[in-house]
Amino acid sequence: MSSSSSTRRKRKGAPTSPVPSTRPPKRASTRPRPPPGRHRPNQGPPSDAMSPDDSAFLDRLPDELLLQVLELLDVGADERNTTFYSLCLISRRFGRLGQHVLYKTFDLDCGRPGPFLRTVIARPDLAQRVRYVLWEYNMAQPGAPPADQPSSSDLRSLRASLKRQDLPWSGQWQTMYASGHAACLLKLLLLHTPNIRYLGVVDRTSPRAYFDVSLSNESWTQLFFPPEHRVPSSPGLSSRYTQLHTLHLRMGGIRMEHIHAIIRLPSLRRLILNGAYHPVNGPSQDNGVATCVPSSSNIVHLEVHRSFMSHTGLAQLVKACRKLEHLVFSYDSQSYTRNVAEIGYPILAAALHQHKHTLEHIDLDDLSDRKIPALIDYPRGTIGSFQDFTKLNYLGCPIEAFQSWNSNEWGESHVELHNVLPKTLEHFSLTVFESEEVDGTCYSSLASLSAFPGRYSKGLPQLRNITIRVHPEVYLKNTDLWKLDISFVNCEVYLRIIQDGKLWTRDDFFEDSSSDGEEDSDIDSETLSMIEGAVTASAAAVMATMLAVTQSLHHLL
């Protein structure tokens, strides 16, 4: 008992040697070994043994070239976001470069404003990459869906961004962010994207919609005017937007004071307005026009579509440009209520002549409802001659703007176009109204222009296209405009006649007459069949009479 316990104690206290660890047997690799003389697959290929196929990988391009390759993708397609999102999942490098291209352009029709704005606020590096923004909103619609509502972390990022930019009214900005309205989100977006080059804003709010009008006016003030004291407004389109090149606005409430705040941007070169109108017959008109300083804008491309702006407002905008090259203006009475925005061609001509050495494109059109007497019962004057314009290659103008002369005793008038058009003209567009059905001024003017080939070739050697824009109220088939197509065949000038977007051909002028001819032919065939039936009946009656006479003679014999 004692010996066994002592032996047990000795074993217990004796130093024990470590048990050697046994590793599991290494499994044989099923991958075939490369033959000797070649590199292993997990090692980089030697520079002297690189094959053409190995050097053709897209990820071997430097970042600058890879960005150019990614930008060649169609940025206007609907599947653009999906395409770039798939590219971002290839690798971290592709994800970093793909985000730079993905956030360069944002279209509200193809994306959601909530996630985009959330990323722009949290990622200043991506906010610097934003170049093109297309934004639409409707003040009568509710805010963002619950999925796009900002979270506590989003509001924290907004507070940090406002603090970084040293902007006050943090509480008001957070309230606007939480509202989810697209107009408010646009103002927040403008706070964080100073490198925008193209901005398109479309207000689709119906004028008959029931919404807070003060909210709409406030959005305009916050969008285009600098911040005032104790008013939570964004800097909007302030001077810090040093790269804004093009601004396209389709907003029905644009007034002259809004436009004056826009054209002062030093970087703006292209301005497109749709639906702008000018308050008339009131003190606000004179005050608004007086603030437009001549030669104060760097805009070279100005377009005003479907506008009820008077000649005074348009002339002031033209004079405000230093070197205007492109001008488009279409007069429309859709905003007409009581006051009339009059058009005076002499005042427009004086403003245009200040840019006679720089203007290359002039297009003036009238889309108003000329059935309203107040819109036409006043003298509009004439626009004069364009022969001293040295670079003008496109001219569009109503025929009524030119001085007309009576050509005969029946009161037909014409315009001596060879005395008013410049020699550099390549495309000429004329707008004709309902008076063309009576006096034929456009037809006589263009016919006289094509009747003298020698004078035509010397006066307008570069003219190749003539477009006649017919007002919707004109009944084209009562005019002789179709004959002009034959007149300009020998002059190598392509003539087009357009009404309401439809291109008229010679067959369209005779469509009714051909159908009338078919009706006449149908009537004639019906008449012939009736005559044939009558002749047959008469012949049958004659035969019956002859048969009766023959039978009576037979009885007598």
Image: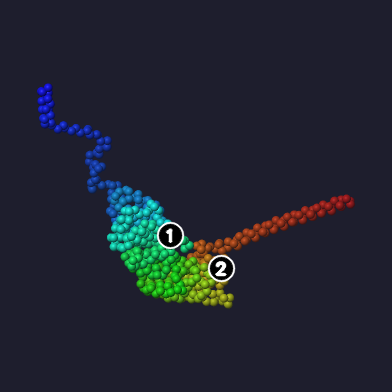
**Outermost residue to the right:** 556
Q: Quadrant of the N terminus?
A: top left
Q: Position of residue 82 (x, y in %)?
A: 37, 51
Q: How many angstroms separate mark 2 from mark 1 (CA)?
A: 44 Å
Which residue is at 52% across, 74% downward?
377
Which residue is at 41% across, 63% downward?
215
Q: Amino acid at mark 1?
A: Asn
Observer able to see residue 557: yes
- Considering only order in the chain, which callout, 1 or 2, is on the residue closer to the N terminus? 1
Q: Position of residue 92 (x, y in %)?
A: 29, 50
Crowding near the residue tagged with mark 1, few <14, some 14–19, many ≥20 C-alpha atoms within 10 Å:
some
Q: Position of residue 31 (x, y in %)?
A: 27, 37
Which residue is at 35% across, 49% downward?
86
Residue holding disc 1: 138
Residue holding disc 2: 479
Q: Position of residue 61 (x, y in %)?
A: 29, 52
Where residue 188 sits, quadrant-wise, is bottom left
Tag 1 secondary structure? loop
Where residue 138 sits, quadrant-wise, is bottom left
Q: Amino acid at mark 2?
A: Thr
Tag 2 secondary structure? loop
Colouring used for the render: rainbow
Q: Which of the labelled discs sits on residue 89, or is there none? A: none
557 over 496 or under it: above or below:
above
